[in-house]
Image: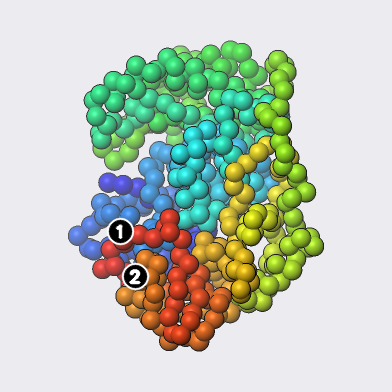
Amino acid sequence: MPYFRINKLKLNSNIISEEAFYRRIREIIPSEFSISHEEIGGVKIFKTDFQVGKLLEHTLGFIYIQSKSSMLSAIALQPERNDKILDLCSAPGSKTTLIAELINNKSFILANEISLDRVKALMFNIDRLGILNTTISNNDGIRISNSFKNYFDKILVDPPCTALGDTRFTPQKQIERNISRLENLTQIQYQLLVSAAKMVKVGGEIVYSTCTTTLEENEYLIEKFLSKYPFEIVEPEIPGLKFENLTGKNIREDLFHSVRINPTEDDEGFFIIKLKKKDDFDEEKKSNLHSNDFRADEIHSSNSHKVVDILNQISNNYGIEFDFWKDHLFLLRSGDIYFSSINEFDYSRIKFIRFGIKLATLDKKSGWRLTSNAVQILGRNIQKNILQLENKEQLKTYFLGQKTKINFPDCDFVTVKFGDYFLGSGKVRDNILLSYFPRSRRTIEIDFEFVK
């Protein structure tokens, strides 16, 4: 049975309590399907045999399907406000988005991913879940350390692995191929861990995790790393769970405090260990990752003359108090404005491909229009031009980007709602709603039978 979590960030945007949302989901799911939950490290982890991916709530980012053991590595990181956090191998974003939720979209996360194809999935999930505090980079996780010596407070290293923690749906040939790559993968894993070791501050922490069961990728690799670098194993301290890695203890006494989860019918096997940097160490100096032509002064605060007029326009168009913008940073790019949670990250250190989430796009005829992803984040802050859909048919046509007949005055800056869910952006002409719901998130997979 699949596990999932509820995204509190979206609940807050829509002013819905976690308890009320759970009751709603329990009412939506037919009685013949089971649903249960447990709380681990402050995260409620749900389990059901119903396909929650069919729900409107999943499309809107209130629900994220993720294995329980996968959630534990993000929980073990114990992110805190004001931390600078790096997720070194972040796609598709399951752990990145949970880390963001744990710190309420504050502080800063650099989500790095070497595969440009996988970055697309990362962007999709960041947009769907409304993650504001994350910047995405597309760099080699080994070479990126040249730009960040002793910089991050927390780093998550979840490297490519043989993925033997869950072989239920993996063809035998793929399993054999993964095992044949073991030696190459362990080299990459070790190099990524060393890279993280260079980048984390003294006193900072690394969580290393894999979804595989081999000793070579887990305990043996950590034993090799600790024999060379000034780190110590610290207990993950995941409230609600107690782990004792007896397999690891036989290799090295303090590996007793690492986590080894065996595969089950419901969950994948995982290895998790938390490492604390005790001292700095010298490595051969190398040049920077690349010459970065990005200027840090392209990131603006809300009172910058570059963005203040734009923000005033958006505030006027949507009834948003201007003070709301003070807790955010902004980036202008070719007729678009992006926004992120305020932070102290040094953006001049690295070239990145995404900053926060796109806030608005300039329509040359009418002005700055919020994106649908931004509407879902801003939600409760929008007080003007709110259009309430009346039935499931209107909801369906809006999601599919079709013209929706509606009784509403002409308006260029419409915020579309269904019930108490903020859906996205649109405009109305002659009682026709034109949808600006993003093409990448339009779906016919929603089972409208379960829409309440």
The image shows residue 317 at horizontal and vertical percentages of 63, 76
Is there CB contact under 8 Å for labels 2 and 1? Answer: no
Give the distance between the C-alpha atoms of the residues marked 2 and 1, in whole angstroms: 11 Å
Q: Residue at x 58, y 12 (%)?
A: 227
* 444 or 363, nearer to the observer: 363
List the residue tagged with mark 2: 396
Classify mark 1: helix, strand or loop.
loop
Bin the neighbour count of mark 2 within 10 Å (Cα to Cα): few under 14, some 14-19, many 20 and up: some
Q: Amino acid at mark 2?
A: Lys
Classify mark 2: helix, strand or loop.
helix
Q: Residue at x 71, y 36 (%)?
A: 292
Q: Residue at x 47, y 55 (%)?
A: 128
- Relative to 84, is 178 above or below? above
Furthest residue in direction front, as rendered: 365
List the residue tagged with mark 1: 445
The image shows residue 255 at horizontal and vertical percentages of 49, 21
Q: Quadrant of residue 391?
A: bottom left
The image shows residue 74 at horizontal and vertical percentages of 51, 40
Bin the neighbour count of mark 1 within 10 Å (Cα to Cα): few under 14, some 14-19, many 20 and up: few
